[in-house]
Image (cartoon, helix red, strand yellow):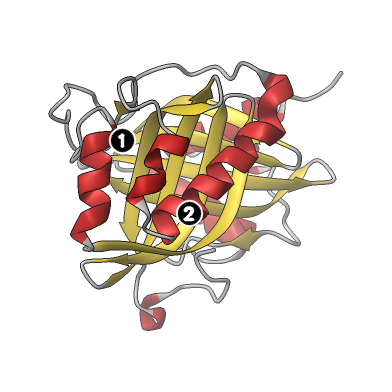
Amino acid sequence: MTIDRRDQVRALLKAIETGDPEAVAVVSTETYIQHNPQTLDGSEGLAELCKRLSLKSPKVAIVRTFEDGDFVFGHTEYDFGNPRVGFEVFRFEDGLIVEHWDNIQPRQGPNSSGRPMTDGPTEAVDLEKTEANRALVRYFVAEVLIGRDPDRLASYIDRENFSQHNPDLADGSAALQAFLETGTTRYERNHRVLAQGSFVLAGSEGTRDGVHTAFYDLFRVEGGRLVEHWDAIEAIAPREEWKNDNGKF
């Protein structure tokens, strides 16, 4: 019987609520690499974190999860007394989780279009278009976000039917174009693009108001166009505050 990696990740994330050590057993005790700078390296660090967080009676809601080869990525809501929204990325090897990345920010909104940060479709479709959709997002990030070329928006986005879940932006491409033209947020490097069917997640690095920042952007693709967007934006802690040496990305 094939074990569903997404189920394993869901159980692991729920262990933040329960402190369940069995759910954490999916994490390799020998090779686990932690990229959250605020968390100790190794599976012991993760188990300790889950146990500590469970004492705060947290709430964890896994909104959507996807699988891309050895990677599982999820979109999740947390409430530790201060509601947050984030993305989690796990890499599997020989049936165990061996690497983890995340990006988490305070939950805000709804935005001016009335959209919360996490609602909308949750299931991937068009699985046969995974690679085409991955390429679309990769080029969008390179040309529009890193290249800061808002004139290229029309090549990627349906201007009238673009649903936006960023708490500071409205639906449509006009708000996104205005955002790109302000210059206060700069994408400088894309590290990874993960995809399953109609959903594509891009993890990038740059600055926001001059602060070193990580950007995770989830897009839904339909008909060769980006039609929906969710994100999480997190300042990267100064190097002297890191609890491991693996880097955010």
Residue 112, located in which quarter of the rendered image? top left
Element carrying mark 2: helix
Q: Position of residue 11 (x, y in %)?
A: 57, 30
In percent of width and height, residue 209 lies at 20, 67
Is residue 132 found left or right of 198 in the rendered image? right
Image quarter of the C terminus: bottom right
Q: Residue at x 33, y 27 (%)?
A: 159
Q: CA distance from mark 2 to mark 1?
A: 43 Å
- Residue 206 image offset from top left, x and y in percent: 39, 66
Q: Is residue 54 visible?
A: no
Name the residue nearer the viewer: 133 or 54. 133
Indicate the amino acid at tag 2.
Glu
Q: Is residue 148 above or below residue 134?
A: below
185 up-or-down from 82: above or below: below
In the image, 162: left or right of 37? left
Q: Quadrant of the rendered structure where residue 164 is?
A: top left
Residue under the point 69% across and 48% down? 91
Identify the amino acid type marked 1. Answer: Ser
| Residue behind mark 1 | 57
Quickly name the residue at label 2.
143
Residue at 87% from the left image edge and 18% from the top image edge: 1
